[in-house]
Image (cartoon, rainbow, N blue to C red):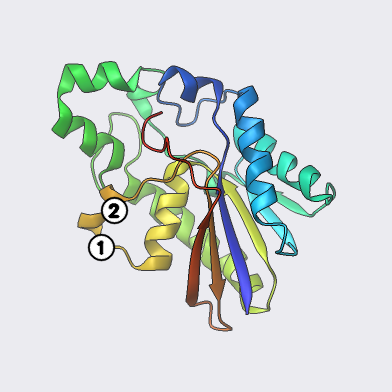
Amino acid sequence: MSYLVLVRHGISEWNKLGLWTGWKDPELAAEGYEEAKRAAQSIQDIPLDKAYTADLKRTQETTQTIKDELGIPDLETIVTPAVRERNYGDLAGKNKWKVKEEYGDEQFTKWRRGWDEPIPNGESLKDVYNRLLPYYHEHIEPELKTGKNILVSASGNSLRALVKYLEGIPDESIAELEIGTGEVYVYQLDEQGKVVSKEIRSSNPKKGKV
């Protein structure tokens, strides 16, 4: 058996401002570091063997904070664009709540949480899924099958794509999944890489509001 620990990065400076971030690269806010510390404290019982994180400041800062808090600052960590946040294209840098006012609730929800809703010059969640899953199958899943405990520190939509796969969430239901900043999803997997249990730790009551 192995553990797959998914952590959404702590709140960033842009999250606090309500800005769509995507591939933009703001740093964690002070509160984001605190969220990362709480995330670490919630998984003290899991001995980690390796970490994967995106090539963005907010995810790397979250990962390093978790490692420091757990007393494993030198844990092997792979930085890869494969688990990078969704590219929000022309929406990146815009205030999401102003976009909601301008385009209405329905279009806003499709852009923000839909499965195959295109964003001009950006990605859909389906696109994120299609770039992340091959990497997961080639690099992360084989390690889980050997019993290693793996941390993946990434962004909301890349984690939503992975959770969709792990839990078999239908396309039409994925819009209902919200993962708050600093939240931790802990999966226990068998030798075939199948999920046998799930637990949400360090839950964020403000999820979906930033």
The answer to the question of whether label 2 and label 1 lie on touching residues, with beta carbons closer than 8 A, is yes
Residue at 64% in and 53% down: 42
**202 w.r.t. 133: above or below:** above
**90 w.r.t. 196: above or below:** above
**Is residue 62 something one can see in this rendering?**
yes
The residue carrying mark 2 is: 174
Q: Front-most of 138 and 6?
A: 6
**24 w.r.t. 38: above or below:** above
Under mark 1, the amino acid is Pro
Residue at 59% in and 59% down: 5
The residue carrying mark 1 is: 170
**111 w.r.t. 141: above or below:** above
Q: Front-most of 157 and 134?
A: 157
Under mark 2, the amino acid is Ile
Left/right placement of residue 76 relative to residue 198 reads: right
Question: What is the secondary structure assignment of the residue under circle 1?
Answer: loop
Marks 2 and 1, Cα distance to the nearest angstrom?
A: 6 Å
Q: Front-most of 45 and 138?
A: 45
